Amino acid sequence: MIEIALKHKPFLRWAGGKNWLLKDLHKFVPQQGFNNYIEPFLGGGSVFFHLQPERAFLSDLNSELTDTYYAIKEYVEEIIIELRTYQNTEEFYYRMREVMPQTEIKRAARFIYLNQTSFNGIYRENLAGKYNVPYGHRTKNFLDEDLLRKASISLANATIGSRDFEQSINDINAGDLVFIDPPYTVTHNNNGFIKYNSKLFDLEAQYRLSSFVDEIKNKNAFYILTNAAHQDVKTIFTKEGDQIHTVSRASLIGGKKATRGQYEEFIFTNTNQ
């Protein structure tokens, strides 16, 4: 019998994560329940770990991220043992940032370590596709063994892979719930699409995502889509009969001295109609 974990926080820090949404998530989850859970932009997985679905299909275009999730699912104790040998120092951080280990366990340990000790948990690549986030000077312990074990239990019944979001459509059936949290490629409440890492989730990708939502609805499945509160986004994702909610959250990006203001986001959904 597989042990069922209780809801818990993500084991990764993730800029743009949805921890802020969890307190109100019950307002958007189908009141009648749902079958499988699909998340094609996995990131930190806040909603997945909060909902604890019995069966999930988790994916992201970032293969380093999804490989880490898979390794935590399969080899959590080995990863913990590896992380116990790491040091939270600037010298060790930059040494680890420059290497790419050959084993699945060591690569996952490196990803978690860099994530936990970097500046603000940002995942950023240069134009060559190389991770280039600076050291974060955090004093918090980067290894939470209990949380990693809980994450491993939560992932036990999850199918994990790296792929474009459109490929998730084959896993979706009637009554499933799809949580969609794409890269926010427009500046909040301003004009202009912006780059995300070394790839571009541009205006064309937003229209592809809109068509993906249409396919979800055609399958009689549920969706919850979060996106920037921008007029172009509203125009693209407004669907007849669906709901649009505007929610405010604090910006979590910036240094200690940065001004962190309130930003609005849209939630589009066809649940609870």
Image (tube, rainbow, N blue to C red):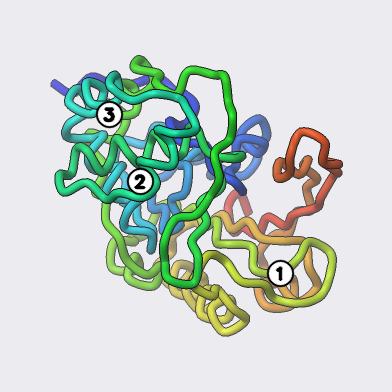
Q: Is residue 56 left or right of residue 262?
A: left
Task: Tell me where residue 170 sits by quadrant.
Answer: bottom left
Give the numbered dot on residue 186. Answer: 1
Q: Foreground mark, 2 or 1?
A: 1
Mark sitting on residue 105: none
Where does label 3 land, which residue?
A: 152
User: Seen in the image, is 7 located left or right of residue 190?
Assistant: left
Q: CA distance from mark 3 to mark 2?
A: 21 Å
Q: Earlier in the sequence, mark 3 or mark 2?
A: 2
Which is in the foreground here, disc 3 or disc 2?
A: 3
The kind of residue on which mark 3 rests is: Ser
Total label count?
3
Label 2: which secondary element? loop
Which residue is situated farthest in the top direction here? 146
In what quadrant of the picture does the C terminus appear?
bottom right
How many residues crowd around disc 1 within 10 Å: few (fewer than 14), some, or many (20 or more)? many
The residue that appears at 39% across and 21% down in the rendered structure is 143
**Residue 35: image tag:** 2
> What residue sits 42% from the left and 53% below the top?
39
Coordinates of residue 85 in the picture (x, y in percent): 28, 21
User: Residue 47: horizontal and vertical position, in percent?
Assistant: 50, 39
Give the SS element for disc 1.
loop
Res 164 quadrant in image: bottom left
Q: Mark 1 or mark 2, which is nearer the start of the sequence? A: 2
Residue 245 in the image: state x and y as whole percent: 75, 54
Quick one: label 1 or label 3, which is nearer the N terminus? 3
For this orientation, the residue located farthest to the front is 91
CA distance for labels 2 and 1: 32 Å
Q: Is residue 23 left or right of residue 101?
A: right
Quarter of image, res 25: top right
Indicate the amino acid at tag 2. Asn
